[in-house]
Image: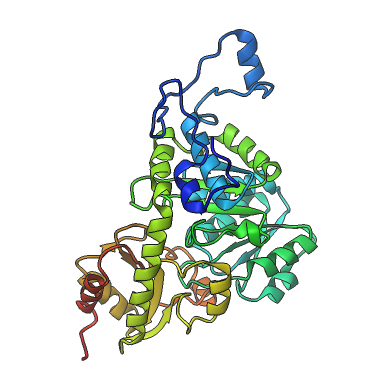
Amino acid sequence: MIDEHDYHLDTLAVRAGQERSQYGEHAEALYLTSSFVADNAAQAAARFVGEEPGYIYSRFTNPTVSLFQTRLAALEGAEAAVATASGMSAILALCMGHLKAGDHIVASASLFGASIQLFNTWLGKFGVTVSYVSATDPAAWDAAVQAQTRLFFLETPSNPLTEVADIAAIAAIAHAHGALLAVDNCFCSPALQQPLSLGADLVIHSATKYIDGQGRVLGGAVVGSQALIEPIYLFLRTAGPTLSAFNAWVLLKGLETLGLRMKAHCANALLLAQWLETRPEVGRVYYPGLPSHPQHALAMRQQSGGGGIVSFELVGGKAAAWHLIDQVQLMSRTANLGDVKTTITHPYTTTHGRVTPAAKAAAGIGEGLVRISVGLEHIDDLKRDLLRGLPDAT
């Protein structure tokens, strides 16, 4: 196994954590088994109580999953990671591991719709309350703290408006009040941003997105210190929303090209965002790599690239947005993102469809908003595809 402190991120994405079996395989091994055999009763007993390392049952111990966890932790500069069945199960596991009835969360108002539903509907059933604040106003986070506040939770960049939060400033506020800061790093991945180095305590990933990068499997992860990961692992061991060995193996293959893909996504997204700013049908473009973005300077300090997500408001509202989405032939009409194939969606009625109109308004999500996850197709072909729904006024 390589020393993770001696290598660059692109190398770690290919090599970190690999331990070959007695067969000396070059590629990572895929362990498709439900359970593992002990040599004797004493060894089985020792493994079940954690006195001896070893694999027991693939719900909570599997070599392929362990390798993915080790490699992702290395990319985030973390001590440990725990893998889950999806990005949403990663958020659930984080909350179950670190919250109890009566606790309070301060969260960004600019969250993925399912995250809001999880907080409001499901955690709310068990007495956990949430206050939503502007992601970009650290003073609002400080003002929202209550005596029972245990967790700050944010996405940066946010979905779908790519708002960029000051991780270091918000981390300092959380820690001053004895709370943890968890950052959803889905839009950037560790290739563009490492929240732990900026003061965050835990990092959330929907590995379904850029970590896989090709729309093949679901997966999630929570990354942080060993002490903070342990209670999350114990919840997953009992409840079972864990990552399958096959999906972990696919995600390992995704990590190998993560750095290269993210550079290409960023380059394509910037070109598309610049072009959209010139279009008369477009009222506003949201992309951290543009100088017009309100948090452009912060994004360029905090991230190594603008990312692959471009959102924009059409002058004609919902009718114009749906017309554009219906006319494209190359882009995929799906709410998934982070794929080598460009995807397009209408956040108001898809990703945030279950969010109340008032909450959507508070988050700045209007009916004319379109979100594009820019893939790796040629930029000229992407522009031509959009022109099918944006008649060329020139």
| Figure quadrant of the C terminus | bottom left
Q: Residue 56: where, in percent of width, then height?
A: 55, 22
Q: Residue 296: where, in percent of width, then height?
A: 52, 78
In the image, taking residue 393 as reference, residue 18 lies left or right, namely right
What is the quadrant of residue 180 in the picture?
bottom right
Q: Residue furthest top?
A: 40
Q: Nearer the viewer, residue 277 or 125?
A: 277
Q: Nearer the viewer, residue 322 or 221?
A: 221
Q: Nearer the viewer, residue 241 or 269?
A: 269
| Residue drawn at point x = 71 percent, y = 47 percent | 100
| Figure quadrant of the N terminus | top right
**323, above or below 118, in the image:** below
In the image, taking residue 337 as reference, residue 19 lies left or right, namely right
| Residue drawn at point x = 22 percent, y = 90 percent | 393
Q: Residue 347: where, in percent of width, then height?
A: 40, 68
| Residue drawn at point x = 40 percent, y = 74 percent | 311
Q: How many marks?
A: 0
In the image, taking residue 188 as reference, residue 94 lies left or right, namely right
What is the quadrant of residue 24 in the picture?
top left
Tell me, what colour scheme is on the image? rainbow
Asked whether residue 368 appears in the rendered view, the answer is no
Q: Residue 357: where, in percent of width, then height?
A: 48, 73
Asked whether residue 241 appears in the rendered view, the answer is yes
What is the quadrant of residue 210 in the picture?
bottom left
Q: Residue furthest front?
A: 6
Q: Nearer the viewer, residue 333 or 173?
A: 173
